[in-house]
């Protein structure tokens, strides 16, 4: 009985830690892949972002997009934004991070 409780407790703690790990991965990917254009805060107020007129990722317009909509943009590219070569799990992590920029 004690081992079962310990196993369930460890499993629950591991499951709760996963979103934090995914968010950290998303932040790291965002920093390397997205920051040059969208900026650290998502505003798009970088020299490249201003030149390309990128969207403010914090805006209600972007934040109301579904995960599927954002996945499509990241996967297929849009306008001057290139197609992403990220794995599906990494795209999901980046989207989770973008959601924190509100």
Image (tube, rainbow, N blue to C red):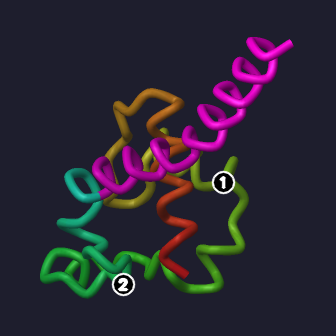
Q: For this rendering, which residue is in front, 95 or 15?
A: 15
- Residue 16 among magenta residues: yes
The residue that mark 2 highlights is: 43
**Nearest-to-viewer mark from 2 and 1:** 2
**Which residue: 56% across, 42% down?**
17
Q: For this rendering, which residue is in front, 63 or 27?
A: 27
Characterize the local packing of mark 2: few (<14), some (14-19) or many (20 or more) Cα atoms within 10 angstroms: some
- Residue 24 among magenta residues: yes
User: Measured from the top left, where is residue 67 in percent x and y?
Assistant: 67, 52
Magenta residues (range): 1-30
Q: Does 74 sit above or below residue 3?
A: below
| Callout 1: SS | helix
**Which residue: 71% across, 18% down?**
7
Q: Quadrant of the C terminus?
A: bottom right
The residue that mark 1 highlights is: 69
Q: Does 54 sit above or below residue 88?
A: below
User: Measured from the top left, where is residue 28 in percent x and y?
Assistant: 28, 51
């Amino acid at each position: 009985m004690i081992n079962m409780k310990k196993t369930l407790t460890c499993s629950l703690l591991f499951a709760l830690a996963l979103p934090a790990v995914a968010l950290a991965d998303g932040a790291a990917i965002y920093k390397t892949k997205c920051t040059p254009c969208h900026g650290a805060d998502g505003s798009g107020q970088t020299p490249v972002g201003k030149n390309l007129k990128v969207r403010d990722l914090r805006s209600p317009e972007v934040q109301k997009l579904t995960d599927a909509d954002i996945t499509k943009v990241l996967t297929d590219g849009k306008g001057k934004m290139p197609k992403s070569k990220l794995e599906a799990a990494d795209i999901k992590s980046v989207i989770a991070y973008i959601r924190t920029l509100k």
